[in-house]
Amino acid sequence: MEKEKEEIIELILQLIERKGALFIMHLARRLQINYNYFVVTEGFGDVKNLEDLFLLAVDYVKTNNVLVSPDLIEESKNIVLDLAPHSEDYPSVFSTFALDACACCYDMFSYLLENESDSIISASEMSINTVLIYKMEELSSKYPEDELEMRAYESAEVQKELLYQKTLLKRIIAENDIDKLITDTLNKKYESNIGLIVP
């Protein structure tokens, strides 16, 4: 896995400004579905609030930081933390996926404020780990614990996530019309990166 992650990081380091934000937005959008699933099944959280925060981030990027103040973006980071479930209250694996979704949104707002590649890398790893944990949970009855991570990594699901990120990064890097990509991000119908369907 380290080789694939290094390839992804090398691509991430080529992103500048709004292109970096756009990549995190794609990841956050997919993980947001996992959060929505948790809210519906566990009864904790706020789907609309997280959606509104995402759209605020989109407006911030679309208008080149003109119409949305940095103070509002900073405030949004704190709201995301309040929306995240506590694993001790919700011990199911789905709370982990919801936490990952909130953490990814937190990274998104951090990047908008600081423009640091570390936030993009963190969001990328969060998305990969969501799939890895999902697959480890699925395979836990079939393999001993010391084999689980390797088996999960070799799964089609994790490999698909790695390919998705690399393909998306190359597309964003090559695209000159960033506004078109932002519009596509809003209009695209997203699927969960672990196949969850909100009831």
Image: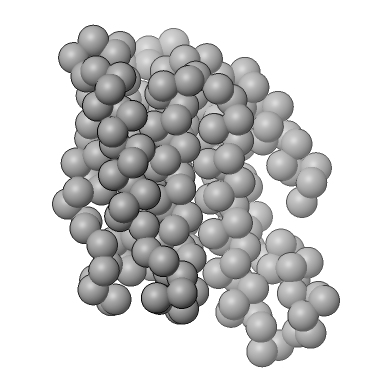
Q: Residue 197: x percent and y percent? A: 32, 68
The residue lying toward the viewer, choosing from 2 and 179, is 2
Q: Residue 22: x percent and y percent? A: 41, 28
Q: Residue 124: x percent and y percent? A: 57, 42
Q: Give the left or right position of residue 193, taking residue 124 as reference.
A: left
The residue lying toward the viewer, choosing from 69 and 169, is 69
Residue at (46% x, 48% y) in the render: 103
Residue 169 visible in this rendered orientation of the protein: yes
Q: How many marks?
A: 0
Residue at (60% x, 30% y) in the render: 118
Residue 62 visible in this rendered orientation of the protein: no
The residue lying toward the viewer, choosing from 174 and 44, is 44
Residue at (17% x, 52% y) in the render: 48
Residue at (29% x, 76% y) in the render: 42
Q: Residue furthest bottom?
A: 141
Q: Indicate whether 150 appears above or below 60.
A: below
Q: Quadrant of residue 132?
A: bottom right
Q: Residue 29: x percent and y percent? A: 36, 45
Q: Give the left or right position of residue 115, taking residue 48 as reference.
A: right
Q: Give the left or right position of residue 120, taking residue 185 as reference.
A: right
Q: Indicate whether 19 appears above or below 156.
A: above
The chosen color scheme is: one colour
- Placement of the C terminus among the 4 image quadrants: bottom left
Q: Quadrant of residue 55?
A: top left
